[in-house]
Amino acid sequence: PWLRKLHHVSRSYTRTIKRPDSQSATFGAFSGSSTRRLTSSDHAQGAAVKQHIGLTALVVENYDDAIEFYTSKLDFILIEDLPQPEQNKRWVVIAPPGGTESQLLLARANCEEQSSRIGNQTGGRVFLFLYTDDFWRDYRTYVDRGIEFVREPKTEDYGTVAVFRDLYGNLWDLIQPN
């Protein structure tokens, strides 16, 4: 089996993979960008790759209720709120304070099937993982603001974690990594 190991460097990462032929290749995401398109042979030779997940769609019942919850209860920042009248929807993007790469696209359900997923996009599993630099500050703030925690704070090998519900019932981990 391949051995995978992540090395955290600031906000960047590299991944070293030990291949069956005992050679190692290092992949990573770094500050800056390349103007040359990387090929599959570049990847195999360990060339730097810059990718990240920019948006995750979160199905909501109502844009304004969702914006209010995330910005007033969790202190998220409203990045964009653009009407798309030709599709009878809005392009609404939010992000946690200090977050620079991953953002949430609030996507209003527009049919029965999508509505059935509101609050349960992952079948009861934790859906989103909110990393913080101060667990107890955020935990106390969220409790004071009426956020429902369904699993109390716990210290794990990877950090301090507790599970809360958002306004629709989606489960989130609040985590301060070690």
Image (spheres, grey):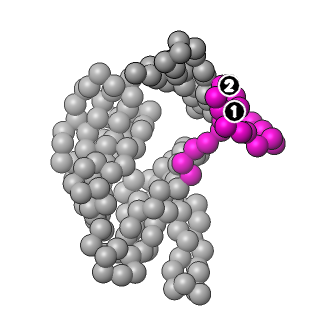
The residue where tag 1 is placed is 41
Task: Give the x, y percent position of residue 131.
Answer: 42, 38
In the image, residue 58 sits, relative to residue 95, either above or below, namely below
Mark linked to residue 164: none
- Asked whether the viewer can see residue 140, the reply is no
The magenta stretch spans residue 1 = no
- Please give the range of residues in magenta: 32-54
- Considering depth in this image, is 159 or 141 the residue closer to the camera? 159
Name the residue type under label 2: Gln
Apparent side of residue 17 relative to residue 38 in the rendered image (left or right): left
Apparent side of residue 41 relative to residue 22 in the rendered image (left or right): right
Q: Quadrant of residue 63?
A: bottom left
Per the picture, the main secondary structure of the magenta-coloured stretch is loop
- Residue at image position (80%, 41%) is 36
The residue where tag 2 is placed is 45
Q: Quadrant of residue 146?
A: bottom left
- Asked whether the viewer can see residue 109, the reply is yes
Q: Quadrant of residue 98?
A: top right
> Do the CB atoms of the residues marked 1 and 2 lie less than 8 Å apart?
yes
The magenta stretch spans residue 53 = yes
- Residue at image position (31%, 43%) is 173
- Considering depth in this image, is 117 or 48 the residue closer to the camera? 48
Task: Give the x, y percent position of residue 22.
Answer: 53, 12
Q: Residue furthest front?
A: 21
Helix, strand or loop for disc 2: loop
- Residue at image position (37%, 49%) is 128
Helix, strand or loop for disc 1: helix
